[in-house]
Image (cartoon, rainbow, N blue to C red):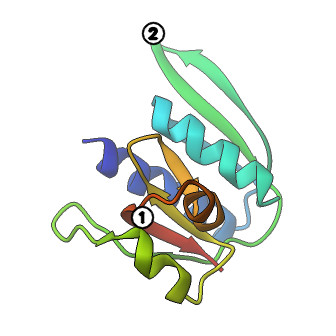
Amino acid sequence: MVMITLINNIIRLINSYNSGKNICICIYSKISMLLLGILIEKKIIKSFFVLLFKNKKKIFVIIKTIILIKLFSKPSNKRYIKNKYLKKIEFNNGLIISTNIGLLTIRECLKLKIGGKIFFSII
């Protein structure tokens, strides 16, 4: 369920930007908040706000730059990577990995020497 929410939010961000809008409303979850924190660090989004709308939390996102994202794992096809193979990957800066700590970039995984599930790459 968590992965479906994340993929849904990523697709919402991409579709909003491709349609010419710089604003997107995403589904609220704790892992979505981690994802948006990483996207702020990468300077892809400007900011985000949590709003209460009809007794449900929604995330209001302001998009800054173009988003090119390649999805690797899907709910039906999960891809994992071990720590020893992280150095061989070419996507050094934009690869997002789900670990037991949370969502991390590939550089953070290399520092902590942990692997995990590959979610997507920001190009």
Question: In terms of image quadrants, where is residue 92?
Answer: bottom right
103 over 107 or under it: above or below:
above
Image quadrant where one finds the C terminus: bottom right
User: Is residue 31 at all visible to an observer of this figure?
Assistant: yes
> What is the x, y in percent for residue 88?
51, 89
- Looking at numbered disc 2 in the image, what kind of residue is underneath it? Asn
Q: Residue at x 48, y 50 (%)?
A: 9
3 over 54 or under it: above or below:
below
Give the mark, 2 or 1, whose residue is nearer the N terminus: 2
Residue most extreme to the top: 55
> What is the x, y in percent for residue 20?
73, 67
Residue most extreme to the left: 76
Q: Which residue is mark 2?
A: 55
Name the side, left or right, on which 119 lies relative to 35: left
> What is the x, y in percent for residue 64?
83, 58
- Looking at numbered disc 1 in the image, what kind of residue is underneath it? Phe
Image quadrant where one finds the N terminus: top left
Q: Which residue is mark 1?
A: 119
98 over 30 or under it: above or below:
below
- How far apart are the two marked residues, 2 and 1, measured between alpha carbons? 30 Å
Callout 1: helix, strand or loop?
Answer: strand
Q: Nearer the viewer, mark 2 or mark 1?
A: 1
Q: Residue at x 47, y 60 (%)?
A: 97
Q: Could you tell me if the residues under marks 2 and 1 are in contact, i.e. CB atoms within 8 Å?
A: no
Name the side, left or right, on which 57 lies relative to 8: right
Circle 2 Cα neighbour tier, 10 Å, few/some/many (<14 / 14–19 / ≥20) = few
Q: Residue at x 51, y 60 (%)?
A: 113
